[in-house]
Amino acid sequence: MSPEIVYALNRGCWSLGEAAEEHTVALFASTGDGIVRLAVAIERIEDAGEIDGDKKRAVVGTVLRPGHPVHDRYVGHRAPEQLNVTFRYVTAECRQVTSRAAIT
């Protein structure tokens, strides 16, 4: 998949607290092998509705490309240790799929 498709499928709907507003980068890693697949410069965190009474939020930002120091440090490499929380994202059909992400 292209980075834009990976971003579109993984940017929301997360259970993110207010602390997420202070972060500048989101890393998205595969739960299968723990490899970071995408780094995104966060522009803002937006409300994404509710699922089963749980408020969800989405990452809005710019996909970082090769040559950017964060991309080059993390994408294609094992996720950092702090990337250890399993979240859920929903597809366009609102089916839940397990994934991992870290906001750094």
Image (cartoon, helix red, strand yellow):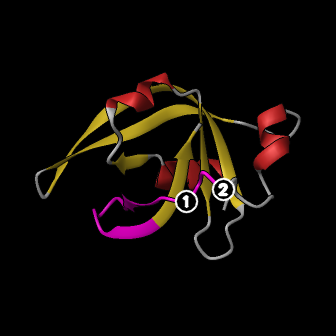
Q: Is residue 82 covered in magenta?
A: yes
Q: Measured along the vertical axis of the image, is residue 61 above or below residue 35? A: above
The secondary element bearing badge 1 is classed as: loop
Q: How crowded is the residue under tag 2: few (<14 C-alpha within 10 Å), some, or many (20+)?
A: few
Q: Residue at x 72, y 36 (%)?
A: 64
Q: Quadrant of residue 26?
A: top right
Query: In the rendered image, which quarter is residue 78 located in?
Result: bottom right
Q: What label sits on residue 84 in the rendered view?
A: 1
Position in image of residue 11 (x %, y %) = 47, 46
Q: Residue at x 43, y 32 (%)?
A: 20
Residue in front for this viewpoint, 59 or 94? 59
Q: Amino acid at mark 1?
A: Asn
Q: Position of residue 69 (x, y in %)?
A: 84, 33
* Residue 22 versus residue 59 in the image, above or below: above
Q: Is residue 3 left or right of residue 94?
A: right
Q: Which residue is mark 2?
A: 81
Q: Residue lying furthest right in this view?
A: 67
Is there CB contact under 8 Å for labels 1 and 2? yes
- SS at badge 2: loop
Residues drawn in magenta: 81-98
| Amino acid type, label 2 | Glu
Q: Is residue 25 left or right of residue 20?
A: right
- Residue drawn at point x = 33 percent, y = 29 percent: 18
**Quarter of the N terminus within the rendering:** bottom right
Q: Is residue 89 left or right of residue 24?
A: left
Residue at 70% x, 53% y is 80
Left or right: 39 in relation to 20:
right
